Image (spheres, rainbow, N blue to C red):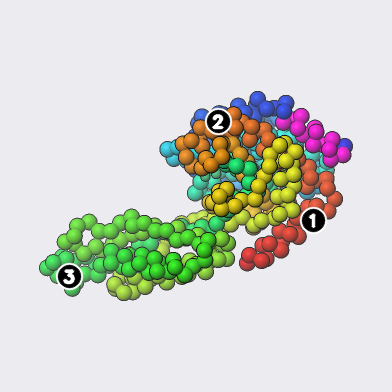
Amino acid sequence: MDLDAVKHRMAEEIDRRADLLLDVSHRIHAEPELNFEEHHAHDLLCDLLEREGLATERRAHGLDTAFVATAGTSGPTVAVCLEYDALPGIGHACGHNIIAAAGLGAGLAAAAVADTCGGRVAIVGTPAEEGGGGKVLQIRAGAFAGVDAAMMVHPAGADLRGMDTVAIHRCLATYRGESAHAAAAPERGRNALDAAVLGYVNVAALRQHIGPAERIHGVFTEGGDKPNIVPSRAQMEWYVRSPTVAGLQVLKERVIACLEAGATASGCDLELDWLEPPYADMVPVQTFCDLYVANAAALGREVLAPDPDNRVVGSTDMGDVSYEVPSIHPMIQAADPGTAIHTEAFAAFAAGPLGDRAVVDGAKAMAWTVADLWMQPGLLDAITAEHREQVAARR
Ligand SMILES: [Zn+2]
Ligand SMILES: [Zn+2]
């Protein structure tokens, strides 16, 4: 079979299962599950993969709601990542039900032709993207060892080549001082709230001298109990973001210096608790992304480069995967233009006609991209080389 025939066959495999894929999307949407609690989605997807005859490992990589299903016996391995976690309060407002159903469709279409094409596919269920860092934990457990390339689509209000990702690390800063009667014996006190306020002001000054795409945001979560007691404890939560993980390391050191200076000035102690795991930025691999863009174009979708008026800014644990293996994370239109993810409006679109179209088109565009990687001579080598260069440039 030549590449065109393979792609035609893959589209048939997806069209034949369109009702099934939309049912999966709607059922996951109707039962939103939070980080690491996605048992319904895990079981639903694993049951289907097993029924389709794929070797499926449930509760993979040491996580109760991760899985991996594989097909193909030789050749390069392409991973399709399926997210299925939801947000507290607003359900599938990030549309991960679409990611799961589109990835399932792409994976099953690839599995149907894997041996014909001489390729392997891994359908990887990746829980807890919304703050849990499921993929970071899966990488540590070896989930992407032996994988040559990885992909997913993420729904949005537009078709875009990617998300404008930033690396992020979150931190709890706890200051401890000495309590004292604020009026009777203030000289005995060491004011932890003062320490926190000074630290905050230092970071505010730092903000003027950081990169244009870097962000530092903090809130006070504890600041004393009563004005007549010198606060012995104060706490802040900080988000530190930078375009790359390497830049994030440097920025974190500067933030730490600001926060420590507050403790020094007020005679208090500071404890920093960096909340694991941090999320890396996405390493761009244009040659790889071009394949997806061309395949989406064949479905009538014009996939644009993000610009300041048309982009999605955020962080994703797919960034960490992108440092391990060449990866793409294109955005697929599943809502009216301008609809932001993480809103109730987006949650409604995620189970509506635009969301459904994104499931079927996303499945095809990804499946065809898998076929390109498997069958176009030299392509995967070129992508691997570009990826290596990009990672080196970011270190
Ligand atoms: Zn999200
Ligand atoms: Zn998301």
Task: State the CA–CA distance, disc 1 to disc 2.
Answer: 38 Å
Which of label 1 and label 2 is nearer to you?
2
Q: Identify residue type, mark 3.
A: Pro
To which residue does mark 2 refer?
Answer: 351
Could you tell me residue 337's position as x and y percent?
Answer: 56, 40
Quarter holding residue 153: top right
Q: Earlier in the sequence, mark 3 or mark 2?
A: 3
To which residue does mark 3 refer?
Answer: 186
To which residue does mark 1 refer?
Answer: 381
Task: State the CA–CA distance, disc 1 to disc 3.
Answer: 69 Å
Q: Nearer the viewer, residue 146 or 357?
A: 357
Give the structural element (helix, strand or loop) at label 1.
helix
Q: Identify residue type, mark 1.
A: Asp
What residue appears at the point 63 percent right and 35 percent down from the top-left corner? 358
Q: Identify residue type, mark 2.
A: Ala
Q: Which range of residues does the magenta coloring cover?
A: 2-14
Tell me the chief SS of the magenta region: helix
